[in-house]
Image (cartoon, coloured by chain):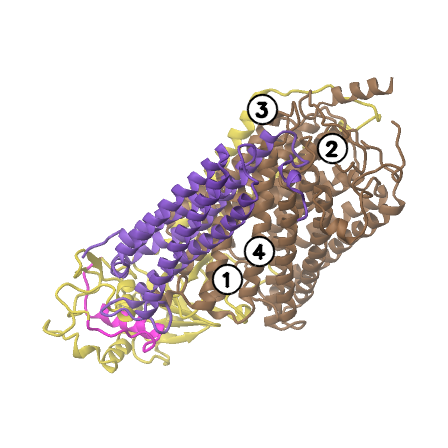
Amino acid sequence: MITTAVEERQHYLNAGYGLKSWLLTKDHKRIGLLYLITITLFFVLGGVFATLIRLELLTPPGDLVSSETYNKLFTLHGIVMIFFFLIPSIPATLGNFFLPMMIGARDLAFPKLNLLSWYLLVIGGLFTIFVMVAGGVDTGWTFYTPFSSSYSNTYVVATGVGIFITGFSSILTGLNFIVTIHTMRAPGMRWLRMPLFVWSHYATSLIMVLGTPVLAISVLLVAAERVFHIGIFDPAFGGDPVLFQHLFWFYSHPAVYIMVLPAFGVLSELVSTFSRSRVFGYAFVAFASLAIAILGFLVWGHHMFVAGQSAYAGMVFSFLSFLVAIPSAIKVFNWTATMYRGSVSYATPMLYAFGFIGLFTIGGLTGLFLASMGLDIHVHDTYFVVAHFHYIMVGGAVMAYLGGLHYWWPKMTGRMYPEGWSKLSALLVFVGFNVTFFPQFVLGYVGMPRRYHVYPDEFQVLNVLSTAGASILAVGYVLPLIYFIWSLRYGAVAGSNPWRATGLEWKTPSPPPVHNFEETPVVRHEAYDYAALFKEEEAHVR
Amino acid sequence: MGQRFPLFPEQASTVAPMTDNLYFFLIGITVLFSTGIFLAILIFAIKYRRRSEDQVPVQYEGPASLEIIWTLVPLGIVMLMFAWGTHVFFAATTPPRDAIEIYGVGKQWMWKLQHMEGHREINELHVPVGTPVRVTLTSEDVIHSFFVPDFRIKTDVLPGRYTTAWFEATKPGRYRLFCAEYCGTDHSRMIGWIHVMEPQEYQAWLSGGGAEGSMAASGQKLFEDLGCASCHTTDGRGRGPNLVGLFGSPVALAGGGTVKADAAYIRESILAPNAKIVAGYQPIMPTFQGLVTEEGITQLIEHIRSLGQQPGAAPAGQPVQPEAAGTKAGER
Amino acid sequence: MSASHAERLELREQFDTPAQQKEASTLGMWIFLVTEVMFFGGLFTAYIIYRSFYTDAFARASNTLDVAIGSLNTVVLIVSSLTMALAVHASQIGARRLIVVFLLLTMLFGGVFLGVKAYEWHHKWEQNLVPGSRFHLPGEPQPAQAQLFFSLYFAMTGLHAIHMVVGLGLLAVLVARAQMGRFGPHYYAPVDMVGLYWHFVDIIWIFLFPLLYLVNRHG
């Protein structure tokens, strides 16, 4: 393969310089990078809150910060990490950058709308930063009424406005993806030839479009309740505080799938590329994403087994929650089977993929504990839940995000990251994560409730362990931040297809030209057809 | 509490072993499946490691039956979990009929608990061992949650509504009570103790003073102080309905339809009297919202209950006369 | 926004064919409308739940609404949908004057609707039926629940009215562009899209009207 030097060729990064060329860009690749920078900042912010929380929990009494401050810390940690990091993480960065390329399109269907989405995230983020500076908010990211609507005296309305605006960012991104997938596929790119990354983003977009508006109206009603005292969630006026929980979880449970479905998509790409093997049961994996998106809308009540909901409603929700576990299990089995008789490489992205499968398996199986009504009585609202969703969100979504970032970094920047350092960071993240969150399963079953600022002495040992793990995890996260920036200048020059992967995004130079492809590609093979790829390469060399 | 740093909660109620058995089953499944997955990954990663950069493996198309198997087997397992979990849930949330009644009110940031005999406790609750106890809960402000890990029970405590928790302690001792639903600044300080005592000790504690008259008696006093008796006369000729024998019986409403006179209905009738007007009466009763506390309302309910009731129809629990409960506990 | 007339008619660079561009914008608009349905759906759910909790109070409160005015507004809105459809048709056949006329008529009816709505709200304000400390419904045995009805009434009709105002803004932009002769048989997607939006807002009202004004009406 002949690699042209990065500087000589015209590509999306050198197509224009200056702030304006970035802030007014309509190029999905540049917008993807804008998102990358934005959510990295929010990730650091959320990480600072997490650090303070773990430091406070090192000792049983509340000695580092006051209770008011602690409550604001976990609230802001949740809001920042969920709405400003996890939800946009993979879709808005990697999805934005690669979804059009993977289907052979020049851009998303609505480039201006795409830019608007980024601005909406930034504006929503500014509201949240305003809240932090002005004095914080202490309702928990769940905003349960009537505490949020009538009792909290912090900046609930401003936070709500921020989330409302950010919600539209998410809605518009989902809309853009759906339309793009429907109308912009290159010739020959049939639905069942699409990479699984695209399938999982299609499912994610459905949830964004159908769920987010309900969150928007719920937050709006809480704000209205605070400002006008309209009584919709206030029992003193005949309102029902539990109605808020229904509306909130109708969005926020599917939101979990907004965070984890794109991770599934990344995983399929990684496992296939680094095993040089077509994803086992391609169609099953593709439709499992859709099944999760649909079933995900029917299980919200499993957050409310002990909230005074009728036991029979609880049974239905429990039943459906067990069902939604099946498509996730299918995916894990299929990824594992993909390695069978493959050619498995131990490149860094694959290490993250191994980590993901392990942690997601534990996270998913512990979800069954919570779906089981009898057990949920005991573990609901304890650290068991905290551990479970961190296994899914951090062990799952963040691992996949980092794996995907390493995988596509050469394509995005034209440079390789340093192999040794990246392997070290993958190891640190995996070990640090387990030391942080595994003790919390035990802690939860022993009975420590979540959102506790001070706690009884008998819980201390496990909390110390957890904090120690968090410090390892922090090192694991800081390393990539440093070496990715380093690689921009000093990294080895990456060819157009360093991994010898099959996706269309690898058939164009790195970094890609402004319109992605020199000419619109024509797709002649199924996804992940390595034999065909190698034959083509051979023909090319001759 | 035994160990200094426990890794497992004590089993101190009849429900605890049921919950734990289900827990162990789920742990077993988790270990089984994760070990299987980890081993498979490890073996495949080593056995099929890339041996040369140009290696292209022959594409392996496994049998489609594999997909069916690993869909149906997990499905069977989770259905078993569903059935078992639901069974435990109903056991843990259905109180026996002969339970002792306790009323509890959550408010930022304390638990106020009241015995039928009139003892009032804050952040502490004394109960006898080996006797089912039902706690009827409501909140004065935001949502709280009544959580006793060693009993494996938890119930959200909602404003404007009654929810119940029940347990039968199996070991004397002191067990932690937590608020599990985030409720504001001092959420983590809204904690207390459940003291489980031998029946004789409990009797001694009950008779040791601190009682301000039984709940029903306090309710009666409140009933008079608030002037309820001037309309709700016992001869059936008052401006309000006669309350004797009301509790647990069906009430015909002015707009048609009937409602059962349970705790929730009585509470509503005190706070929003015109919501459900009894047939034959005028909507003239003023609201007592703000004039009577949640604890006061539970006392009024107990007073009305003590005026007699329809047998076997108690929604807030088969009432146990204080003396009866005492003797029974004493006999054991 | 210095793009020339010709450039606007051109195919945007990410698309291969005009048909693809049209398909994309139509699908995009439909998906947007789905999000709007979900948005209003939350409020409708809340309304239906409380209506079943507090049937009597809601029925009494809804009886204070004026069905005649509500019906008038419904007719006005349906007529505006008709003129909107005619505007789309006019652009399809290239009748440039008619596009402007029908768009203006649509705006006129939309404006009438909002005016009538404003009158209704003002009337409620004078009757002290706006939720808050002044709220008072004479003879109502369950004022809190009745107030809840009005909270939902104002939330739902208010949100609908905001959508109407947005629609009027979009129509104003269309009128300006139509007067410059931008639309014709080759290019009328914007008129079509705004039309879809306008019909959607209309349909929301078609649901609001019976739910708020008509259900359980007696006397």
Which disc is residue A23 wearing?
none
Task: State yes or no: discs 3 and 4 in contact (Cβ < 8 Å).
Answer: no
User: Which chain is rendered yellow in the image?
Assistant: B
Q: Which chain is home to disc 2?
A: A
Q: Which chain is home to disc 3?
A: B
Frontmost of labels 2 and 1 is: 2
Distance between mark 3 and mark 4 Cα atoms: 46 Å
Distance between mark 4 and mark 1 Cα atoms: 31 Å
Query: Where does label 4 land, which residue?
Result: A165
Q: Earlier in the sequence, mark 1 or mark 3?
A: 3
Frontmost of labels 3 and 4 is: 4
Residue bounds of the magenta highlight: B284-312
Give a yes or no on whether discs 4 and 1 share a subunit. no
Query: Where does label 1 land, which residue?
Result: B180
Q: Which of A317 and B66 is in front in this view?
A: A317
Distance between mark 2 and mark 3 Cα atoms: 32 Å
Q: Colour of chain C?
A: purple
Q: Earlier in the sequence, mark 2 or mark 4?
A: 4
Left or right, A408 with respect to B207, comes to right
Distance between mark 2 and mark 1 Cα atoms: 49 Å
Query: Where does label 3 land, which residue?
Result: B66
Amino acid carrying mark 1 in the image = Ala
Left or right, B154 with respect to C14, comes to left
